[in-house]
Amino acid sequence: MAKQGAVWVLGTMSGTSLDGVDAALLRTDGHAILEFGPDAYRPYSAAEQSVIRAAFGQWPGDPAVAAAAEVVETAHAELLARFSGAEMIGFHGQTLAHDPVQGRTHQAGNGGLLAQAMNLPVVWDFRSNDVAMGGQGAPLAPFFHFACAKWIKATEPLAILNLGGVGNVTWIDPSLPSPEIPGALLAFDTGPANAPVNDLMQIRLGLSHDEGGALAATGRVDEGLVKAFLTQAYFHKIPPKSLDRNDFQPFFKKTHRLSNADAAATLTAIAAASVAKAAEHFPKPITRLLVAGGGRHNATLMAELSRRMACRVEPIETAGLNGDMLEAQAFAYLAARVAYGLPTSCSSTTGVSAAVGGGQISRP
């Protein structure tokens, strides 16, 4: 365990939507956010996306994993080399498979190699310890979301929604002093977010995503499919709970009969309806939903959220936070907590039996 104090940490995130790698500097003592630093983004090329996509659903030792890990490690090293002033790195890696029921989760990328390349300590493998102790291993950003609520001086319950490949939400009571206290947080995956639309666009049109929700805006939502989607067992489970990006693939075959526009509209509506369904689990109602992640740039998705939610739906920038870098900042914050021996998850965020710290530290 490191001696606790303020530290500049460079956090990274490579999400299941496969757009690229985010990196952001954050100064923290492991409790409070003290200062936000510079950030940067390095997109994956189409070829790199293809290599990583080929490894989705695979576990260590499977055929496509080594190639995917090499892409992930190379992209991170290239991006992190642009920064100076970091004392530590928080490296999430690229999730390829997640199966907490079987007690396993797989993020490609070796933090030890990155520590050598960057000549800095690297905190990584954040999820395995939580899963080994019976937790879902996800979502892991909630402790950081609690710090964000303190940073913006929120006083009433609110929620932060991240729309990446999968959606996850954190309900927060900022009146309590720390995130592991019972009643401070409730966090879980809401359902699919960008991944199904991204896959649709890639398969049918050779595009990486539906820019701004433009295609979905021209389509008609099949509300029957939306309603049917919400009857699946996952939505009746009590949180915390988590998902793999491919968990609903059999259901999404039902959209194959729809036109491109109608399929995009329906998948976008499903993402929003999943969030509205998730809100039924909140301990207390919220008046404000702050949205982070790539999905907030999708005007059609944001409109669907506003239509289906009984509260204000706002991009997180309205609170002075950076929705593109929130998860990279989260893993910077969590890296400091790992280094200082502080918990990174608890029963109300991942379902783990007790507040637990995750991650391993590799030194150069």
Image: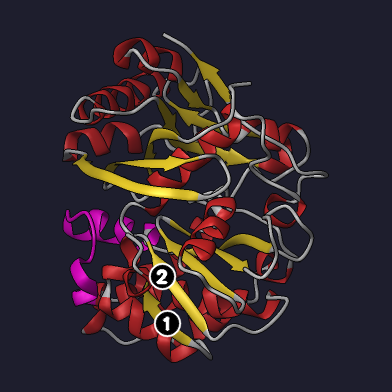
Q: Is residue 182 left or right of residue 53?
A: right
Task: Please rate how many residues cluster around mark 2, counting C-alpha atoms within 10 Å: few if below 14, some from 14 to 19, many from 20.
Answer: many
**Which residue ends up furthest to the right in the rendered image?**
353
Q: Nearer the viewer, residue 145 or 264?
A: 145
Q: Main secondary structure of the magenta part?
A: helix
Q: In this picture, is 77 found above or below 279? A: above
Q: Tell me if I can see residue 324 in this picture.
A: yes
What is the secondary structure assignment of the residue under circle 1?
strand
Q: Is residue 255 left or right of residue 213?
A: right
| Residue in view at x 48 percent, y 21 percent | 62
Locate residue 323, reporting x and y percent: 34, 61
What is the secondary structure assignment of the residue under circle 2?
strand
Asked if residue 206 is among those painted magenta in the image, a careful observer would answer yes
Locate residue 245, reporting x and y percent: 48, 51
Q: In this picture, is 163 found above or below 361? A: below
Q: Nearer the viewer, residue 311 or 6?
A: 6
Task: Please rate how many residues cluster around mark 1, counting C-alpha atoms within 10 Å: few if below 14, some from 14 to 19, many from 20.
Answer: many
Q: Quadrant of the N terminus?
A: top right
Q: Quadrant of residue 304?
A: bottom left
Range of residues picked out in magenta: 195-215
Q: Quadrant of residue 322?
A: bottom left
Do the residues under discs 2 and 1 have CB atoms within 8 angstroms? Answer: yes
Q: Tell me if I can see residue 262 in this picture.
A: no
| Residue in view at x 19 percent, y 67 percent | 211
Asked if residue 260 is among those painted magenta in the image, a careful observer would answer no
| Residue in view at x 43 percent, y 91 percent | 307
**Which residue ends up furthest to the front in the rendered image?**
5
Q: Which residue is mark 2?
A: 291
Amino acid type for the residue under numbered disc 2: Val
Q: In this picture, is 130 found above or below 184? A: above
Q: Which residue is mark 1?
A: 313
